Amino acid sequence: MGKKFFVAGTDTEIGKTTVACGLLAAANQLGLRTLALKPLAAGADNIAGELRNEDALALMDSASVKLAYEQVNPVLFDPPIAPHIAAQQAGKRITVSQLAGYCRGALMTSSDFALVEGAGGWRVPLSGRETLAGLAVELQLPVILVVGMKLGCLNHALLTAEAIQRDGLPLAGWVANTVDPQMACFDDNIATLKHFLPAPCLGVIPRLQDTQGTHVAPHLDLAQLAL
């Protein structure tokens, strides 16, 4: 059934989808059948009378295996706020088992390379008891960590990597995504991350005007994922 990974981030708005689309494009260029899911999203646009999330649409556009929108993004809330708060406001309940069931169904579709993209950071709450990290654990997916390169990213990255390992999952690799192009000592920060993070760096994404997957892919190296 191919290789499957969970894409996590050190924070929200640090480029998880940009990196995921780049990974999909790079895998497409290798001739692999690619599939991507965004099981939970908060923040929607009304497109032809239907609520749609822009990240989920970008993943659908980048993946070569085409699924229905509802398979890619089965749980969507309108306001761009923390998912558990959005669920409370909507009078709904989100559970890890529910999300895992949706993912398992979609992941039964044949592919060579599949990504499940998280929402926010590793410990974003789903309810008073569960966090989205539980989904990666339930699915037993190796994690690709997107590090948003800005002041404070070293602490965020190392704490997230420790949490992933504490939850019993392997860190398959990490990608540095330039959030702040004026970040001081950028190369030194990359070197520090390479020293401390217990996984290979899959690429360093510069600040791009066009963040479509095909423009991100040249900055990524999938060889270390053993595809």
Image (cartoon, rainbow, N blue to C red):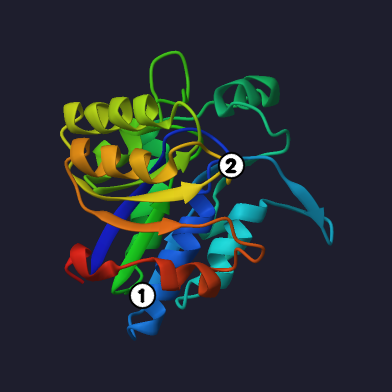
Which of discs 1 and 2 lies nearer the camera? The answer is: 2
- Counting from the top left corner in percent of width and height, residue 19 is at 46, 57
Whether residue 93 is situated above or below residue 188 in the rendered picture:
above
- Asked if residue 62 lies left or right of residue 169, the reply is right
| Distance in Å between CA atoms under marks 1 and 2 | 30 Å
Residue at coordinates 54% horizontally, 49% vertically from top-left?
A: 74
Label 1 secondary element: helix
- Counting from the top left corner in percent of width and height, residue 209 is at 67, 63
The quarter holding residue 160 reads top left
- Counting from the top left corner in percent of width and height, residue 218 is at 43, 73
Badge number at residue 27:
1
Q: Badge 1: few (under 14), some or many (20 or more) residues near its Cα, within 10 Å? A: many
- In the rendered image, the residue lying farthest to the bottom is 31
Mark 2, residue position: 182
Q: Badge 2: few (under 14), some or many (20 or more) residues near its Cα, within 10 Å? A: few
Q: Earlier in the sequence, mark 1 or mark 2?
A: 1
Label 2 secondary element: loop
The quarter holding residue 191 reads top left
Whether residue 146 is situated above or below residue 108 in the rendered picture:
above
193 vs 162, nearest the viewer: 193
Residue type at the position of mark 1: Ala
- Quadrant of the drawing holding the C terminus: bottom left
144 vs 177, nearest the viewer: 177
